[in-house]
Amino acid sequence: MRPPRGTEGRIPVPGGAVWYRRAGGGGVPLLLVHGGPGYPSDALFEAFEPLAREREVIWYDQLGVGRSDPVHDTSLLTVDRFLDELGAVQEALGLERPHVYGHSWGAMLGLQYAADRAPRWTSFVCASGLASVPRFQVEVRALLAAIPGDVLDRTYGRELRGETDDPDYRVAHEEYMSACVLRTSSERLAPELMDETTFRTMVGQADYHVTGNLKDWDVFDRLARISVPTLVLGGEFDECVPAHLADIAARIPDAEHVTQPGAAHMGYLEAEPLRRQYTDIIRDYLKRVEDRPSSAAGPRR
């Protein structure tokens, strides 16, 4: 996955410096906060590059992954530091009223940032981002139990028994990925892109067994504080189930919830036409927010 054409640079953030790429121009900028934790922004390159024909789009790699500085001190791997990093990126790039898109882990950061720091964003797209890790654990294990072939025991059960070196563990994990993460495309994030230190410290072994720093993370009781217009977007077969996302939207005063039929967790990587539909849903929402009579789109940077 090649970076889109544009200008790139590095931004000092707590703990080091992060890489960014900005492309396009005009309109209200769109800042992309990638998922993970532990994967870079590469997966968002292709799907969001067409939006750079209409507005400025900014990708950045969080500290510890991709083209950004590595993390050698795991005490840096905290939610608060990643929130500070998001703020530092916005400030350094002069993004006063951007649209912000976050996917999965990036959407979790966006939810907490919007709830706790009252940013002046034009809008926020919460894409497949959960608001409660404890609740998510219950929901995702129910999904695993519903997949034919005893996938729950072959994944989560093996983790509990310390049997993750069994070759069938990876086979069962892929069955889960094909059911709940990416259904219509054989495309997968390259394993070499993942920073294992970040993922293990924040998550643990896998999404369905969170033992890292995020295991007790929950912001449901803070969502009513969010004053940013918000699109809560997910897939019909998403590991972050539609009911979870609907409850997020219900608690945010100005929010819409859209479930994309046929898609799972990574709608931006699904096969065409789902991939194009995913981008179109986001494009339409950004335009509708900007077209509101009372919308203060603010500076174009």
Image (cartoon, grey):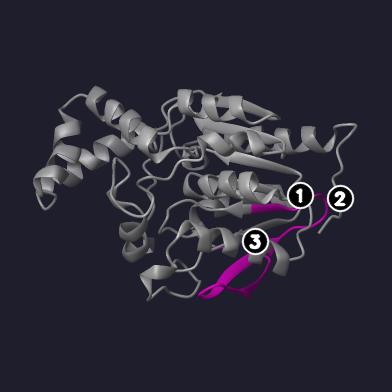
SS at mark 3?
helix
Q: Tell me the number on the disc at residue 298.
A: 2
Left or right: residue 95 versus residue 61 is: right
In percent of width and height, residue 291 lies at 85, 34
Hey, what amino acid is under mark 1?
Answer: Arg
Badge 3 local density, few (<14 within 10 Å), some, or many (20+)? some
Q: Tell me the number on the disc at residue 120.
A: 1
Q: Dividing the picture into quarters, in which one does residue 152 lie?
A: top left
Earlier along the polypeptide chain: callout 1 or callout 3? Answer: 3
Q: Nearer the viewer, mark 2 or mark 3?
A: 3
Along the line of sight, which residue is nearer the eye, 187 or 19? 19
Q: Dividing the picture into quarters, in which one does residue 191 lie?
A: bottom left
Residue stretch rendered in magenta on the structure: 3-31
Hey, what amino acid is under mark 2?
Answer: Gly
Q: How many marks?
A: 3
In percent of width and height, residue 61 lies at 53, 64
Q: Are marks 1 and 3 in contact (CB under 8 Å)?
A: no
* Up-down relation of residue 180 to residue 194 (above or below): above
Q: Nearer the viewer, mark 2 or mark 1?
A: 1
Left or right: residue 156 versus residue 77 is: left
Q: Are marks 2 and 1 in contact (CB under 8 Å)?
A: yes
Residue at the (39%, 40%) spot, across then down? 133
In percent of width and height, residue 269 lies at 48, 43
Hey, what amino acid is under mark 3?
Answer: Gly
Residue identified by numbered label 3 = 87
Residue 80 included in the magenta stretch of the image: no
Residue at the (36%, 37%) spot, across then down? 134
SS at mark 2?
loop
